[in-house]
Image (cartoon, rainbow, N blue to C red):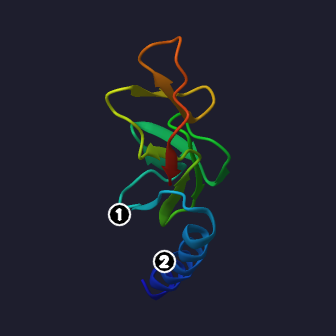
Amino acid sequence: MHRLLKSFLAFLVAVGSMVTLGDAHCFVVLQGPGGPYRGCLMNGKLYPFGHIERTENCYQCNCDKYSMECCSLFFTPVSYDQKKCKVVFNKKRCDYDVLDRDPSQPCSSYSRVG
């Protein structure tokens, strides 16, 4: 149990550094007792232990027998004209597209957060 707490504390420090440097959305899923012993379970899919470059939901993760630590590969658009523009998630590119509701007009005034 003590080792788990030390690992979790080290993860929090690392994530705190990443968030301040990269603004990615990060989270931790702790592996419960009796959980999968061949990897980490997320959204019904079993991922192998180790580094996962990209999940099917566009997260980069690290999986060990204690937890699955993930950060998003995308940034969420904010501060855009919601009447003029629409946001569509492009799962192939792991990114949001901000599109004008009228395809003949550009929709370029927006910012993003992680």
Q: On screen, 2 above or below 30?
A: below
What amino acid does circle 1 point to? Pro
Where is the N terminus found, in terms of image quarters? bottom left
Could you say whether the residue bearing mark 1 is in a helix, strand or loop? loop
Could you say whether the residue bearing mark 2 is in a helix, strand or loop? helix
Residue 57 picture location, percent across and down: 50, 37
Q: Residue at x 57, y 72 (%)?
A: 20
Q: On screen, 49 above or below 96?
A: below
Dot label at residue 33 = 1
> In the rendered structure, are the residues bearing label 1 and label 2 in contact, judged by CB atoms less than 8 Å apart?
no
Q: On screen, 87 above or below 59?
A: above
Q: CA distance from mark 1 to mark 2?
A: 16 Å
Q: On screen, 1 above or below 31?
A: below
Mark 2 — residue?
8
Residue situated furthest front in the rendering: 105
Q: Residue at x 35, y 62 (%)?
A: 32
What amino acid does circle 2 point to? Phe
Q: Nearer the viewer, residue 112 or 21?
A: 112
Which image quarter: residue 82? top left
Q: Nearer the viewer, residue 56 or 40?
A: 56
Q: Residue at x 52, y 56 (%)?
A: 70
Q: Residue at x 45, y 83 (%)?
A: 5
Dot label at residue 42 = none
